[in-house]
Amino acid sequence: MEIEIAATPAGNDASEARPVLRLTNLSKSFGGVQALDRVGLQVGRGEVHGLLGQNGSGKSTLIKILSGFHAPDPGGQLWIDGQEIGLPVAPGALREHGLSFVHQHLGLIPSITVLENLLVYDLAIADRWAINWRAEAQRARELFARYDIRLDPLAGVSRLSPVERAQLAIVRAFDWLQRTRGGKGASGLLVLDEPTPFLPAHDVDVLFRLVRDIVRAGTSVIFVSHDIDEVLEITTRATVLRDGRIAGTFDTAAMDKRAIVHLIVGQHVDLESMRPPAKSRGARAATIRNLRGGTIRDFSAELVRGEVVGLTGLIGSGYDEVIYMAYGAVPAAGGVLELGSRSIDLPTLRPREAIAAGCILIPSDRPGAGAVPTLNVTENVNLAVLGDVSRSWALADTKLADNAAALAERFDIRPRNPALLFGALSGGNQQKALIAKWFQTSPSLMLLDEPTQGVDVGARAQVFSAIAKAAEEGATVLCASSDYEQLSAICDRVLVFSRGEVIEQIAGDRISKSAIAEACYRSA
């Protein structure tokens, strides 16, 4: 089933030429669950095609079928460069036909060098019994220079920044595509499966310049994302999946954000107009005094009970460092946290002491710093309350399972299977699981870093609701975010940082996405 909301404009060579990829009637069921239902997709030559949808909409299943990880149900058809390819297709055959993939976690090996990662396909798959490392290092330098990427081929990947890792993964996939295609005509199709969720806005811009350069070289791109603004910026056309079916395919230039949200969710959700109800200032709940460390020169703030305070600024302004120092995850050079009747010296604070005082942190790196991906959902959500739910001398498995099931229902964690590994959940459901884990402890101070990063539009509204409910119940929330729309939806005050200091406070009715953006860039 293929639904066209807006046709590609006449005269567009990408639409008139033979499509790079075309699939029809693609279906996939898991037991009694229909993950994909007669899905169709067409990607033109030189096109960046967006793929949007909520968690559980079928995006991941579609990409896994294209990459050869899943076999579809009988009846689907796939054409690459006009040649029909039998399904299922072995991953090696897909590369031969010109498909290359960059998945969300990039597939890099941190313990080896940039060059070794660049050549990992050669080392693992290709029949190369000898590699001229000096020549390959020079080729890598020329490849990186071509796309204005400052990477040392001999550097360890563990020392790269997140955006440098993403650049390496994308260039590696493109390089492999070019080398395997050789003189076969078309430059192939690069599938970018959520490459940006853990990147700040500045780094996303850097990555998009690389994507545009690759497209100018003749390669088509499928860009999978939760972020509607990113899709509107980088794509030519986009397709929305909802409940395993195509909800619509459209030219991004002809669509606005509100209409896309409606397609994704199936109903009207206006995130931009969401604002928390006006609150009267309550009693003081927490105070941070004279915090110093990292980029932060001197930060002080008095926080009241039930208040949601946002911290933001441009990259490098230091706003995101505050919450980690306030939790003891990163050492502070100076400062004091007053929480209730307790006064805590921040340079000596450790996370265990912060938790004991009623302070919790939900970091932006959910699988890496907020959970144990190799444990299941039940084990992860119960970590904070083992002593309350279980016995001190032995784990009460039934009680732990019952608590996890109740939390999954309350916070809408999908699928409703707490026995699943935490790492198998989508980004949005990982976030809801972490919120469930910590909110059940009734913290007095909640520290959040990018709470909806990589979370789809439907789950965003659920996360917003959970934060609002915690504030209603008396928690004080300090939220660091580069997402101005998110801040305008949940915050009572927003503190804007520049060069390690607060340069503006926006409060109450003055808070809006445009007002926050203006304050941030005015300080640049």
Image: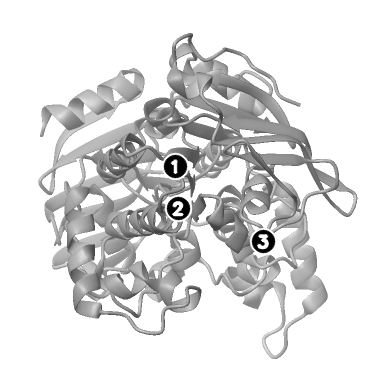
Label pair 1/2, CB-CB below 8 angstroms: yes
- The amino acid type of the residue labelled 1 equals Gly
5, above or below 117, in the image:
above
Q: Amino acid at mark 2?
A: Arg
Query: Mark 2, mark 3: which one is toward the viewer?
Result: 2
Residue depicted at x 56% and y 13%:
7
Nearest-to-viewer mark from 1 and 3: 1
In the displayed structure, does residue 412 sit left or right of residue 215? right
Along the horizontal axis of the image, is 342 left or right of 2?
left
- Residue 83 at x, y = what percent? 64, 40
Circle 3 sits on which residue?
A: 90
Residue drawn at the location 41% of the way across and 53% of the way down? 182
The residue sitting at the front extreme is: 183
Quarter holding the C terminus is top left
Compared to residue 106, the image places residue 496 above or below, namely above
Q: Position of residue 456 (x, y in %)?
A: 55, 38
Identify the element where label 3 is drawn: loop
Residue in the foreground of this view, choosing between 203 and 86: 86
Q: CA distance from mark 1 to mark 2?
A: 8 Å
Q: Which amino acid, mark 3?
A: Ala
Mark linked to residue 185: 1
Q: Pointer 2: what residue?
A: 181
Label 1 crowd bin: few (<14), some (14–19), many (20+), radius 10 Å: few
**Residue positioned most to the bottom:** 393
Mark with earlier residue (1, 3): 3
Give the quarter of the image for residue 185.
Answer: top left
Residue 511 visible in the shown view: no
